[in-house]
Image: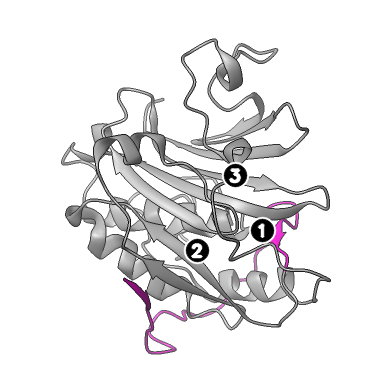
Amino acid sequence: MKRIITAILGTLLLPSVSVADHSWNDYHWARTSASFNLILVNNTTPDWQPYVVQAISDWSLSPMVVLVEDSSGANNTKVRRRCSSIEGQLRICNLAYGNTGWLGIAGISLDGNGHITTGYTKLNDTYFSDPYYDEAWKQSVTCQEIGHNLGLDHQDEDFNNQSLFSCMDYQNPPFEYPNTHDFEQLTSIYGHLDSYNSYAGAGENPDARACNAPPGKGCNKAGSNNDVGWGMSMGRRGNAEKFLRIDRNGVRHLTHVTWAIGF
């Protein structure tokens, strides 16, 4: 079943805060129209459905993109563990992925022009089963990872300063929703038209999948700093870290990692 999740405009549009731009290197989905519908394949289990549906509704308040939920796929353990990227679409999954240190990860793949062609989000139940990571944390991390899939970076990565009231800002307790500046940034990123569409393609691209090879093998081969799983670390700030992996075809795969408190 596919459905477009809508919400009343204005319920989450908080007062704008003057902060620096927070696009993720201007990465964006190529499209030939001002606004576009982006399919999000929802493979989460029922306990995560309210958070995913809320995040879909929130991000669809942007005048540039409407997220269209596809909940028709399987949500068995094998599908959720792999959480393979789908050409031209987003996918979101949850599972107890183990004591990896991360709460959530968001991955994107880029074509030769630097446009996003696939995106995925994983939510780690190993940590979210801890009562410390309550409903606010679940909503905030879901919101943030999908924001990365759309091309946003963090507004701020300091847990100890004043809240910017955005899920793209690191705070404890976390904020659960996008704010006005997030929508302004999306309008800026998508403020031009491209000559082709990189979204809504059918079928799966085997070279654009999330990395699931055994440790030390294939796409999990250690980078120069011995990081495994996502390629080479591009730097860490607080609880956020970015990785880059280039596959055998030269396709760039980038991963935004949200580390759990204390890792």
Say whether marks 2 and 1 touch (CB < 8 Å): no
What is the crowding at mark 2: few (fewer than 14 residues within 10 Å), some, or many (at least 20)? many
Q: Which residue is mark 2?
A: 164
Which amino acid is tagged 1? His
Front: mark 2 or 1: 1
Earlier in the chain: of badge 1 and badge 3, it is: 1
Residue 5 within the segment the image draws in magenta: yes
Which colouring convention does the figure follow? one colour
- Separation of marks 1 and 3 at Cα, in angstroms: 29 Å
Residue at the (45%, 53%) spot, across then down: 91
Front: mark 3 or 2: 3
Front: mark 1 or 3: 3
Q: Which residue is mark 3?
A: 205
Query: What kind of element bears circle 3?
Result: loop
What is the crowding at mark 1: few (fewer than 14 residues within 10 Å), some, or many (at least 20)? some
In the image: residue 36, left or right of residue 113: left
